[in-house]
Amino acid sequence: MPDLSSLSLESVYDSAEYHLVDDLIVPLLSNSVEYCRGVGFFSSGWLRLAAKGLGSLAAAGGNAKLIMSPILSEKDWQAIVMGQQAKENDILRNSLEFTIDDLAKSLETRTLDTFAWMIADGLLDIRFAVPRAKYRAGDYHDKVAYFRDSIGNCVAIHGSFNDSLQGTLNGEAFSVFRSWDSGQQPFVEQHVLRLDKLWNNDNPQFYAYKLPAAIRERIIKLRSAAERPYQLPESLLANVIASPSLPEGVQLHDYQQKAILAWQGNNCRGIFEMATGSGKTYTALGAAVEELKKRKKLAIVILVPFIHLAEQWKEDCEAFGLKPVLCGSSHPRWKGGLRSSVSDFRLTRSHLCVIAVHKTASNKTFLRAFDQIPRDQKMLIADEVHGLGAYQLRKALQDGFDSRLGLSATPKRWYDEDGTAILFDYFDRVCYEFSLEDAIQRKFLVPYRYEPQLVHLTTEEEQNIYDLSVNIGRLMGRKKTGSLNESEQMYLKKALLDRALIVKKAEQKMDVLQQLIRHLKDEGENFQHSLFYSPESRHRLVLQLLKNEGIMAHQFIGEDSLSDRKRILAQFNDGHIMSLVAMKCLDEGVDVPATRTAFFIASTTNPKEFIQRRGRVLRRCPGKTGARIFDFIVIPSPGSIPEVAKYLLEREMPRFAEFTDLAENSFAARSVLRPILDKYQMLHLLDMKPWEVYHNQNPETRDDLR
């Protein structure tokens, strides 16, 4: 029975007097059932030297644990890979053709194959010690081990000797500590404790990667090779990725190149305020690729508001040669994949690409994942950046990124000056602007005609708005004096929302829509590639109305699964679905370039929403030369209450002024409402941009909340 206490052990073994392997390691192994070694450098040649002791350890039913720095020769790496694969491959396992009886002999004659066999059969377990973020510049250099026999005796050794052939030629030494010696027992316990903590990943300086994870993450550092001098195993070839670059045949337009230069000139911070459909995605990825070439190592983190946008970004990233990790609710295993990819990047890869939805990017696990990466090796790209100004999403704006790029056609947040300020504080400023006018003039977007459709409120709706406005005005006055109680504050918020909903869901909108459809049918309109933006909860009414008029339409709503959305959009673009009825889920980022005619039945006052919606319609598509927008505008009736008339015009005019400004039929479109504006002495609204209207409105008119 193995018994370590039967050995006559010296307190110090110096290579000048002893052969460290033959005189110390082999006797200890031969009398042990457990061996745990932590070492800075390892080569399989050491196994050949210690073959006799390892054979005895195996014969006694023992096993060896080795934790080392990931610095290996290519041959040792191949043996480790083979051993791991042989665990799950019986044919490969049997091809090794070894038994415990000839382990010692096999180690001496066929070291690498036996090395693989020991891993496959569980005789040898290997983990790799990799420095955590704070210690990233260092390596694991410890040389410590403990041996335990079947009756619980333990010996710990600590010294300068590495497990390699070269180590036997160096001037090295070991100190030896015995558990049965009461004076030495504390030293044994300390060495056992720290090795076990390292093995179990409780060491604050180093991670301990298990072999399967190490293979998957390719953390092995191949010794003495700046360039890979050999062919990788076929099992790993799929993981080799070429350096990212612009897609073949693609060249950035001059305005995209100017945007990148402006961002670089602003210390790699800023926002691209570029019209929807003008190529923000490719511009951002072009900037990322240039930074990767300069820095040689870069982690690119892309934040998007919705999972369907993550899928679109994934396709674009892959076109640039990036292989992104997607993080979001539709990818439930994203946490493990992210950890592995970050580790891989830190140790062996030149680049990393991660795409996350805004909500996931605010998750603690996601936020901490990049702590290990230096600031200058990270770049944050925030698509539809205005969304990240929301209170619950601001955590995603991590301070640890030196390079920051925001993308949006509308970076300012509607009715949220604090959120807007936070965004501009983080990204610095709009460093490049490419307006819708620029995009249309340079034919990156198609021109459009704007056809306002006038809707009147019913007498009951107008009276309800008046009553709500009176109460809102009264409560706003008390709010200024700070005398509102909690229930009154809740009522005020509800009153503002109720007033906005009356306009959004105005009863006569359905009548005006039906009349318009019949008129267009008389003109020969076939409604192919038509998009209907419905008020919330009214999409079924719109669908039924279209069906009654013989128009085949399909709903596109937030409850649809990602796969259903892809299928619906593909069929719409191909013409297999004639028309789509959507609510808010088409506002941001969804590509529907085939759309030729849009009906804005929902009355939104938020520039973020209506500018995004217009952008959806103006994207170019083969055979598409222009677009038409029918906008349902609620206006005062001839006998409107003055307060209601003023409210309606202030509410609806920002969108009307914005859309008429760049329309092909701008003058004709404006003439539709000019007499009404003149009647109420409000012609000045035609010359104001949406943001200017907002700043000139009274607080009580702001009921289309953020």
Image: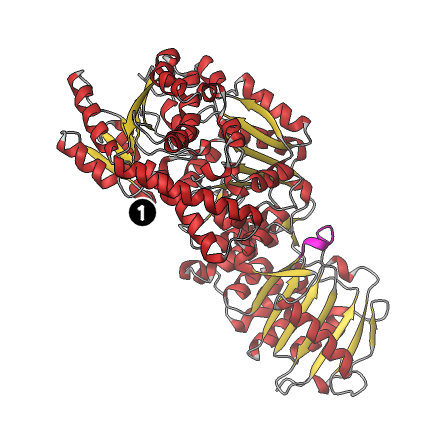
- Comparing 633 with 147, the one in front is 633
Choose top left, top right, bottom left or bottom right for residue 286.
Answer: top right
User: Does 686 sit left or right of 508 as displayed?
Assistant: right
Amino acid found under the numbered disc labelled 1: Glu
Range covered by the magenta-colored residues: 131-138
User: Does 637 sit left or right of 361 as displayed?
Assistant: left
Does 236 appear above or below 120? above
Task: Report the residue that reaches farthest toward the right.
Answer: 16
Q: Position of residue 464 (x, y in %)?
A: 32, 41
Give neighbour class at mark 1: few <14, some 14-19, many 20+ (Cα, 10 Å). Answer: few
For the point 50% across and 28% down, which residue is it? 693
User: Does 663 sit left or right of 548 as displayed?
Assistant: right
Q: Is residue 431 visible?
A: yes
For the point 59% across and 34% down, which residue is it? 405
Quarter of the image that includes the N terminus:
bottom right
Secondary structure at badge 1 equals: loop
Q: Is residue 234 visible?
A: no
The residue identified by callout 1 is 559
Does 275 appear above or below 254? below
Is 133 a magenta residue?
yes
Q: Position of residue 278 (x, y in %)?
A: 47, 23
